[in-house]
Image (cartoon, helix red, strand yellow):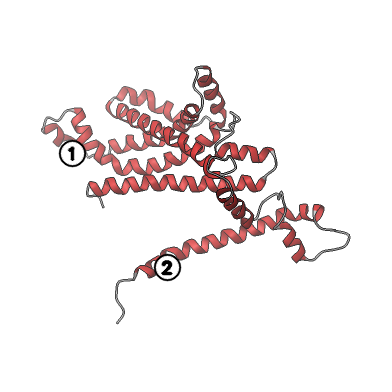
C-alpha cells in the first residue's frame, strides 16, 4: 500500500516541474527572438545572399555571430563560464570581481537605508506632526527618477571629498529606505487598540510599548520590505556606477559593453546581476526564517 505522505522526491518534482516548464518556455522564446533579430545582420555580414542559403544555414549563422544584436542563451552561458574560469578573481574580466564591487555598495546602502527607514517610521508613528510633515515628502521623493538624481548626489558628495563606495551606497540607500519606511509605519500601527490599552494599563512607557509590542508586531511587515529594499538597492548601486565612469562594478561592466558593442558581455553582466539579486534576497529570507523561528513564528 502506498504511503499517504508524498516522498521528498515527489515533492521536489511537484515543485520543480512548473519552474522547469517556465524555464523551457523562456529559452524557446529567447532563441526565437535571437533568430529573428539577428537574421538581417547574418544575411548581410555572414551569408552570401546571391548564392542562396537554407534556413539551417541561416539559423546557424544567427546563433554564432560575434556581435549579435541579441545573443543566444548558449553564447551568454559560454561567456559567463569563460569569465569565471579563465581569469583570476582580481581581474576586471572576471564577473565575480565586479560582483564584489557592486555587492559592497549594495549592502552598505541597504544597511543605511534600513536604518533610515526604521528611524523615520518610529518618528512618524509617534508624532502626528512628523506624520503630516514627513510622509508626503517621503512618498514624493520616489517620484524623482534615480537616473536624474544620481549625478547630482555624486557631484555633491564628490565636492565634499566622498568617493569610491560612499556615493554609490547613498544612491542605494535612497532606493532602499522607502519600502522599509512605508512598511514599518504600517507595521508599527498594526497592534490593536486593546493591546495598546493593555500596555497603558501596565504603565509601560512609549519606548517599552515600542520594543515589546510595536516592533514584534511589525516584523511580518518588515522582512518583505527588506527583500524589496535590497533588490532596489542593487539597482541603485548599478545606476550610480554609470555617470561616474567607474572601471569596476556590474553597472560599469554594462557601460563598457555598450561602448564597444559587446552585447554578449552586456547580457552576461545582466545575468550575473540577476544572480546577485537572488542571492541578496535569499540572504534576507534566511535571516527572516531565523528571526521568526527564534520568536516561535514558524
Residue carrying label 1: 195
Residue 95, horizontal then vertical, whole percent? 55, 44
Circle 1 crowding by C-alpha within 10 Å: few under 14, some 14–19, many from 20: few
Q: Mark 1 and mark 2 in contact (Cβ < 8 Å)? A: no
Quarter of the image with the N terminus in it:
bottom left
Which one is nearer the viewer's eye here, 35 or 206?
35
Q: In which quarter of the image is residue 125?
A: top left
Name the residue rendered at 75%, 56% in the picture. Answer: 39
| 298 displayed left or right of 237 | left
Q: How many numbered badges does the structure rendering display?
A: 2
Residue furthest right in the image: 50
Q: Name which residue lies at 34% across and 28% down.
A: 120
Question: How far apart are the two marked residues, 2 and 1, measured between alpha carbons?
Answer: 45 Å
Q: Nearer the viewer, residue 237 or 94?
A: 94
- The answer to which of marks 2 and 1 sits earlier in the sequence is 2
Q: Where is residue 218 in the image (x, y as percent from the top left)?
A: 29, 39
Mark 2: give few (<14), some (14-19) or many (20+) Cα within 10 Å.
few
Please tell me which residue is depicted at 53% across the width and 60% down the height of the picture. Answer: 23
Looking at the image, is 197 positioned above or below residue 25?
above
Task: Answer above or below: position of 275 versus 22.
Answer: above
Number of the label disc, if any, that sits on residue 17: none
Residue located beneath label 2 in the image? 13
Residue 15: x percent and y percent? 41, 63
Picture residue at 49% right of the left edge, 22% below the top: 162
Is residue 166 left or right of 50 when viewed as pictured?
left
In percent of width and height, residue 135 lies at 39, 28
Q: Is residue 225 above or below residue 33?
A: above
Q: Which of marks 2 and 1 is in front?
A: 2
Give the secondary structure at mark 1. helix
Q: In this view, does 77 lie to the left or right of 165?
A: right
Label 2: which secondary element: helix
Q: Which residue lies furthest to the top in this view?
A: 160
Amino acid at each position: 500500500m502506498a504511503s499517504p505522505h508524498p516522498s521528498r522526491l515527489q515533492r521536489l518534482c511537484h515543485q520543480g516541474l512548473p519552474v522547469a516548464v517556465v524555464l523551457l518556455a523562456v529559452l524557446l522564446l529567447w532563441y526565437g527572438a535571437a533568430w529573428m533579430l539577428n537574421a538581417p545582420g547574418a544575411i548581410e555580414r555572414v551569408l552570401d545572399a546571391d548564392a542562396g542559403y537554407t534556413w539551417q544555414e541561416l539559423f546557424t549563422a544567427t546563433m554564432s555571430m560575434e556581435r549579435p544584436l541579441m545573443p543566444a542563451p548558449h553564447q551568454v552561458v559560454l561567456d559567463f563560464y569563460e569569465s569565471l574560469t579563465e581569469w583570476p578573481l582580481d581581474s576586471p574580466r572576471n564577473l565575480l570581481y565586479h560582483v564584489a564591487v557592486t555587492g559592497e555598495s549594495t549592502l552598505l546602502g541597504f544597511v543605511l537605508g534600513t536604518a533610515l527607514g526604521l528611524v523615520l517610521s518610529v518618528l512618524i508613528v509617534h508624532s502626528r506632526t512628523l506624520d503630516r510633515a514627513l510622509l508626503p515628502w517621503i512618498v514624493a521623493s520616489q517620484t524623482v527618477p534615480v537616473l536624474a538624481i544620481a549625478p547630482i548626489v555624486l557631484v555633491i558628495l564628490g565636492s565634499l571629498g566622498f568617493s569610491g563606495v560612499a556615493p554609490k551606497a547613498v544612491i542605494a540607500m535612497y532606493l532602499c529606505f522607502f519600502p522599509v519606511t512605508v512598511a514599518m509605519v504600517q507595521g508599527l500601527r498594526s497592534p490593536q487598540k486593546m493591546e495598546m490599552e493593555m500596555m497603558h494599563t501596565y504603565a509601560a512607557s512609549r519606548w517599552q510599548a515600542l520594543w515589546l509590542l510595536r516592533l514584534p508586531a511589525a516584523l511580518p511587515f518588515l522582512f518583505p520590505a527588506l527583500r524589496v529594499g535590497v533588490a532596489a538597492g542593487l539597482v541603485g548601486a548599478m545606476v550610480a556606477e554609470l555617470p561616474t565612469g567607474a572601471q569596476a562594478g556590474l553597472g560599469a561592466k554594462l557601460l563598457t559593453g555598450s561602448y564597444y558593442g559587446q552585447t554578449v558581455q552586456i547580457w552576461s553582466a545582466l545575468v550575473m546581476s540577476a544572480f546577485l539579486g537572488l542571492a541578496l534576497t535569499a540572504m534576507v529570507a534566511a535571516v527572516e526564517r531565523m528571526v521568526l523561528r527564534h520568536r516561535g513564528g514558524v
